[in-house]
Image (spheres, coloured by chain):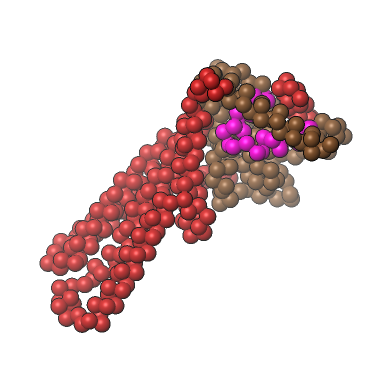
Chain colours: A red, B brown
Amino acid sequence: MSADEFQQLWKAYDLKLQKSLQLNAQLLEEVRSIKVKSTFNRLKAGRIFKICWGVVWNIGCGALLWHFRSEPVFVTCAALVMLITAIGIAGYSYQLAIIQRINFEKNILETQQELAQLEAAIIRTHRIMVLQTPLYTCFWLSRQMIEGMGVGAWAVQIFFTGLFIWGTIRIYRAFSLRNVGQRWMQSVMKNEGFSSIAQARAFLREIEEFRRDPAPDSI
Amino acid sequence: MNDAEFLQLIRDNKGILFKISNSYCRNRDDREDLMQEIIYQLWKSAGGFDTDRKFSTWMYRIALNVAISYYRQQRRSGLRITFGGDLHLMELADRPADTETEEKIELLQQFINEQNELDKALMILYLEERPYRDIAEILGITETNVATKLSRIKGRLKQHLMTLNKSFL
């Protein structure tokens, strides 16, 4: 079969579709009226909520930090949580900026590149936010408690904090590796409407490859 | 453009909707879901459509962008509208089939389905006989790039059909 024949075949297919395809106009209208909640609207609302929550959280943490400023463990934990939250807020703001930019009317490579960048940004922010988890296992240790803690209490404290640090490092690393098949990671990303950073990066590479003009000798 | 005009344009170009949805989703439910998503995005973007430009080019751009995103996300969490009484947006009426042509179309469709999401878009635009300039504009690459990629895809398609022919013999 020649190239022209493929196009002729496609034309025949088109002709068949034109004759046999029945479009339900009433349902078309329904799609418009019902489907107001698009993925992007949900994504946008989610980001705005997280940014607002992050700001409120940091204000609260700041107030508590000032109140317990004489407690070194609490001050360290609260300061680190505030720092990570601030980075998270910046991450969500960046995601929001990408979402605002995404427009399906633009050319395919441009739009798909922005979508893949958004996926990568979502995972990056998740990775960073996860880092604060171990801080919640020790922020409550007051100066007085530390002084009165016995060997057993220290062992339990070190075990739990160590366990959380180990878990956090594992999650952080897993997000950066090609753990596409991991169920937990898929479920985290599914909640955001996306699949995985590995796929996003692979697709960004694919886009770059697709965009590149081939060398004449490779034709 | 008012609603009636827009609906008419969608009706006139329903084949594009079906072919794109069918190339990115083989499963009927997913196809319906994708079609709804494309139509919703078309409705949403209709205000920005410049009537001096060709509707089909604008439609291809939106439909392919939505299809690629849908295909990549393998998303099943979106809001799928199920219409009562087993109603569907599009139905294929039963018509007497030319079996040989149907088989060839199926082979061609199979080949398209095997391509990656971007090559699939390129292949559809080529088969739709869009000029290289339009394809380049829709995809966001140069015309030279379009020509090169198409010659490779056509080569792969010929190879694919030859292999199939051999295995049938």
Which residues are drawn in magenta?
Answer: B104-128
Question: In the current view of this chain or complex, which residue is farthest to the right?
Answer: B96
In the picture, residue B70 is in which quadrant? top right
Query: Does the magenta portion include B64?
Result: no
Q: Judge left or right: residue B56 versus residue A23.
A: left
- A89 or A24: nearer the eye? A89
| The N terminus of chain A, quarter of image | top right
Which residue is at a point 84% across and 32% down the rendered structure image?
A: B100
Q: Judge left or right: residue A125 versus residue B103.
A: left
In the picture, residue B98 is in which quadrant? top right
What secondary structure do most residues of the magenta stretch adopt? helix
Above or below for B155 versus A53: above
Above or below for A23 versus A45: above
Q: Is residue A28 visible?
A: no
Relative image position of residue B72 (x, y in whole percent): 55, 43
In the picture, residue A134 is in which quadrant? bottom left
Relative image position of residue B12 (x, y in whole percent): 69, 26
Which residue is at a point 52% across and 19% down the rendered structure image?
A: A216
Question: In the current view of this chain or complex, which residue is farthest to the left?
Answer: A70
- A204 or B38: nearer the eye? A204
Q: Is residue B19 visible?
A: yes
- A181 or A192: nearer the eye? A181
Which residue is at a point 27% across and 64% down the rendered structure image?
A: A135
